[in-house]
Image (cartoon, helix red, strand yellow):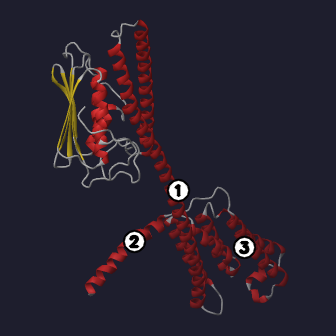
Amino acid sequence: MSGQTGRASRGGVQALWPSLGDWVQQSTLVPARPTIGAIVSVLLCTSYQTLLIARLLFAGTTLDGNAYAYTRDWYGALVVAFIAIGAAVLLIWRSRQPLAVLLIECVLYATASAVGMSNYLLFPLLFALFSCVTRPPAWQVAAGLGSVWAVMTFSAFTSRTSTGFALEYMGQLLTAFATIAVAVATRSVHSWQRTRKHALEEERRSQALARQRDRAVSRTRIAAELHDSVGHGLTTIIALAEGLAGTTGDPHVDEALAGINTVARESLEDTRHAVRALADTADEAEEDTGGKVETDRAPSDDAPHGPVPSLHEWAEILPVLGRVRALGVTVVFTETGRRSPNAHLADLCFAITREAVTNAMRHGDGLRQLTVSWDHGDDRATTVTVRSIGAPQATKRTPDYSAPSPPGTGLRRLQRAVEDTGGTMSSGWATEDEWVVRAVVRAAAHPTPESPPNRSAPREGNP
């Protein structure tokens, strides 16, 4: 029991030392101009010293000792009044130079003690001691306390009072200790106020960064939706217009299809510029916040709570593949295993498939066959494979996946989202005319609730 008590005591002391060290090392910034409190204290001290000298000059007696004798001559009275009142006026500089003012007050107090007039300079000394303890760093506080102790010891030795050295010494030290106690309390209050101010400023800064991050996340989600939904729709329109061009036999219809194709391509280019601008804004916000901005839909249970907008369901891929089939492309869709109820996993698998299909239509010349497979494993992972077969590699324009692109768009955004789940994603040529996109997407350990019915559920079936 005693051993536990001893360990607890040592732990308490070890925990106390850092706090005590912080309190000792802290110092208050020097104000740009004297504060109201400093001015009021100087006025009070000056008034007290003035009244003290006035009483000595006009109502002094022999009981005042040497002070009475020195003030009987006009020049002596002038010197005493100048020193006593000047010691109080000197306190106006104690905010900027607390140690220097205290040392000057100590010299004046020692000089006054030597001639038996220490009582006339005690009040300014205590004010200077108070300022030296409340504001400066630790070494100045130590120097000031040492100076006051030395000068009070000297004053007690030179005192000619009837009380004796011990009582005089104890009286002066108790007066100094009382002043130090008030100064320590004031220093602690200043420290608490400064700590609270810093905490409030840090909280406001954190809130501002959080708001900035939320805006960046919102912008990148909009960019992703533009890239995925609008980009895919415009690409489908372009493919349909090009597929119908020259087959109608009507020049007016062909001209209209050419106009549709031109407008769709211009709109697609404008969409790309908007997506890049939003992504660049998100990058700047990420640099400002000093952290990573989550720009992707990740199938994780750590996602923010509440309704998640525009989460795609598993069955929504069927209309996408149906539109590709309408272009005359052979589309095969296979799915094995049991679908996960994780709404984020379904949304990410849908986004990967749609992006791969869109790229196949956009970059593939003579696209003939498209094969999509979803394989749901028992380890809460889904393998997405998209194979597009078109013209031979030597005669087709190779998709430039190595070209720089802004984060948060296209396959690069999706690859980062897949890697965030602990999965993998790759793309490349399997043969000279077959391009393959393959992703292994993992779900969280606990399934998230299914997405809210914010979309109409398409009819299940193979397109």
Estimate how packed mark 2 is, as few (under 14), some (14 to 19) or many (20 or more) residues with alpha carbons within 10 Å: few
* Amino acid under disc 1: Glu
Q: Which residue is mark 3?
A: 45
Q: Residue at x 18, y 15 (%)?
A: 392
Position of 392 compared to 304: left or right? left
Q: Is residue 197 above or below residue 271?
A: below
Is residue 69 positioned above or below 141 on the image? Answer: below
Of marks 2 and 3, the one in the foreground: 2
Percent x, y of residue 270? 45, 24
Tag 3–tag 1 contact (CB < 8 Å): no
Residue 440 in sight here: yes
**Of the pair 123 and 147, the residue shown nearer to us:** 123
As shown in the figure, which amino acid type bears the numbered disc 3? Cys
Residue 358 visible to an observer of this rendering: no
Please name whichever residue, 452 or 460, is drawn nearer the observer in this view of the structure: 460
Residue at 50% x, 64% y: name it: 26
Label 2–label 3 contact, CB within 8 A: no
Q: Secondary structure at mark 3?
A: helix
Q: Determine the image quadrant of residue 108.
A: bottom right
- The residue drawn where x is 65% and y is 79% is 113
Residues marked 2 and 1 touching at CB (< 8 Å): no
Q: Earlier in the sequence, mark 3 or mark 1?
A: 3
Looking at the image, is mark 3 or mark 1 nearer the viewer?
A: 1
Q: Which residue is mark 2?
A: 17
- Indicate the secondary structure of the residue bearing disc 2: helix
Pointer 2 or 3: first along the chain: 2
Q: Secondary structure at mark 1?
A: helix
Asked if residue 366 is positioned above or below residue 182 in the image, the reply reads above
Q: Type of residue at label 2?
A: Trp
Question: Which residue bears the numbered disc 1?
Answer: 201
